[in-house]
Image: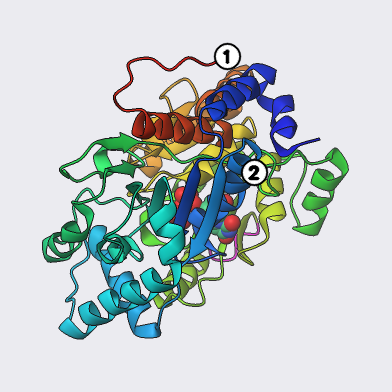
Amino acid sequence: MTLLEQYAQIVGEDVIHHLQQLGEHLQGLKVVHVNSTREGGGVAEILHRLIPLKQELGIDARWEVITGTDLFFQCTKLMHNGLQGKRGELHPDYLTEYERVNEMNAESLRTNLEEADIVFIHDPQPAALLRFIPDRRGKWIWRCHIDASRPFRPIWKYLRNFLEPYSASIWSLSEFAQPLPHPLYLVAPSIDPLSEKNIELEEDELAAMHYKWGLDPERPIITQVSRFDRFKDPIGVIRAYRLVKEYSPIQLILAGGGATDDPEGEEMIRWVKEYAGDDEDIHVLLLPSDDHRTINAFQRISDIVIQKSTKEGFGLTVTEAMWKGKPVIGGDVGGIRLQVVDHHTGFLVTSPEGAALRIRYLLKHRDKLKEMGEKAHNFVLENFLITRHLREHLTLMHAIMFENKERIETS
Ligand code: UDP
């Protein structure tokens, strides 16, 4: 079975057929994606799946990864944070290194980049490549995965110089975008239903989770999966749990990563553990970052998933939980608002009290919980799977390649 056919079981033959039709006019098109890491992070994860799918459709899709020095990555980290609004000085040494590394990578990727019909440049790290490929023949598109709604101005101004000559840019949400003198496209993130994080799990495996993690299978479980970050509001989650606990014998899982490279994260974990105290029904769990299967299982054994963020990008944990048929009680911020349709696929909340109220309501009205979970699953099926992501990439490539044609016939 081909990769695409595997998705047919989930999204139906029609969707796959449509993708194949869209692919027909893009046969042999040379497409290059460039980012700065092959492993780790959402961008790499999505490219690992999108590239083979494009290839299967007959597109000559390639994925190149730029290399850099420590200084370069320190600089691009500052840029990343700067786009998200954090102040930080781009010292001239940083800028020299940023441009030098891009020039060096342009040299080694030159033939590929010059010959490509479409080049997708992901995030700020390789954004300056375009300047060093003056003889490019294709269209270049900058893909921003970051919330740049309120950037630190000096950093944005510097980067904007490199971005203006692009043919287009792609943003995850309209709120995240900055004005640029070219068409701006919106492509929301997606999850892969066939990945370890989302694949169906057997009942036996799920049942074993209770035993393994000391959970009572007879009592409701509420879960939040998140990095231990103040904006994910784990303390607010515990407060909501305590308010519910006065009436109902629930258990709480707060599962997150180790955060070894994040001093603030370690402090947050300490704070959360201290706040949880000796309550045996609060499970603060630190998992290795590649333990996707355990996250998958926690989301599946939960009655309700909570994502009480006070700031959020898109919130893939919300998508993952909804895909598993769980209603999500989410903070009324960022991409959560795009996914949690209040009172339909979950509830939007702005306080621990609000979250507690909604948890109690859902635990009491099991029929509603089930109905919302089903709606949540269908909403993700329609909107946030990788097949939709691929379709939008294909239609965007059509728009870019055939911009003057009014009509494109597909067979
Ligand atoms: N995640 C994980 N292990 C953890 C915490 C999070 O695998 O301990 C995953 C989670 O399942 C999701 C991603 O990391 O796929 C987090 O993405 P999201 O958009 O929710 O938040 P971000 O961390 O990017 O702010």
Residue at 76 percent of width and 57 percent of height: 214
- Determine which residue is flagged by label 1: 411
Left or right: where does residue 324 sit relative to residue 33?
A: right
Tell me if I can see residue 110 in this picture.
yes
* Figure quadrant of residue 335: top left
Residue corresponding to mark 2: 299
- In the picture shown, does residue 152 fall above or below 371? below
Q: Main secondary structure of the magenta part?
A: loop
Q: What amino acid type is highlighted by mark number 2?
A: Gln
- What amino acid is at disc 1? Ser
As for residue 258 lying within the magenta part, the answer is no
Q: Position of residue 211 (x, y in %)?
A: 82, 54
Q: Residues within 10 Å of mark 2 (few under 14, many from 20)?
A: many
Quarter of the figure with the C terminus: top right
On the image, the x and y values in percent for residue 267 come to 43, 74
Which percent across, then down, holds residue 364? 59, 24
